[in-house]
Amino acid sequence: MLFGHIAVSLLQHRYLKADLAPVVAGGLLPDVLDKTMCQVLHVTPSGRMWGHTLLGLAVSSLIVDIACGPRSARAWAIGYVGHLVADTGRQVPWLYPFVDYEFKPSPGLREILRRFAEDHREIVVESGLLAWALFWTLNRTGFGRRKAEG
């Protein structure tokens, strides 16, 4: 869920030296796009469709490159790929629309949140990953460090 994707993006920022804003935005866009289209607008059957594809990665990275430059596009793509890889335990339609996938209807948002709340292992893993990522990100930026007295 959200905590895990933010954590992966923060760790990519730290270890892959990807710019923070585009790596986090790229890491969240697949769900923002697909969950909005499915859960809010009800125009797609699944919460993993267009945004969870290599085509979505390529098109959005090209748009970011044109709008913000290659450095931001690189960070965006890193975050986006991190999101798709983090979702691989479940269906990811990497090659849609070039390959047919059976899109099972997504449960409603309430059901998704209920399942997440009941899966204590997932909560612990994602919260732990986020805490680790925040610790290293904040430590690297100097947040909370005392200035050297001199």
Image: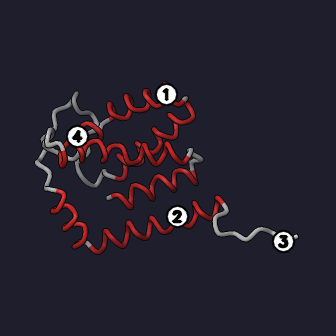
Query: Residue 105, position in %: x, y?
Result: 11, 48
- Residue found at x 24% / y 67%: 116
Q: What residue type is labelled 4?
A: Met
Mark 2 packing: few (<14 Cα in 10 Å), some, or many (20+)? some
Between residue 12 and residue 144, name the one nearer to us. Answer: 144
Residue named by callout 2:
134
- Between the C-alphas of marks 3 and 1, the distance is 43 Å
Query: Residue 143, position in %: x, y?
Result: 64, 64
Mark 1 packing: few (<14 Cα in 10 Å), some, or many (20+)? few
- Residue found at x 52% / y 64%: 134
- Between the C-alphas of marks 2 and 4, the distance is 29 Å
Q: What residue type is labelled 1?
A: Ala
- Between the C-alphas of marks 3 and 4, the distance is 54 Å
Q: Are marks 4 and 1 in contact (CB under 8 Å)?
A: no
Mark 2 or 4: the one toward you: 2
Mark 3 or 4: the one toward you: 3
Disc marking residue 102: none
Dot 2 falls on a residue whose secondary structure is: helix
Mark 4 packing: few (<14 Cα in 10 Å), some, or many (20+)? many
Dot 4 falls on a residue whose secondary structure is: loop
Decide: is 56 above or below 83.
above
Q: Which amino acid does label 3 sit on?
A: Glu
Residue named by callout 3:
149
Q: Are marks 3 and 2 in contact (CB under 8 Å)?
A: no
- Residue found at x 43% / y 32%: 61
Decide: is 87 above or below 42.
below
Earlier-in-chain disc, 3 versus 1: 1
Residue named by callout 4:
49
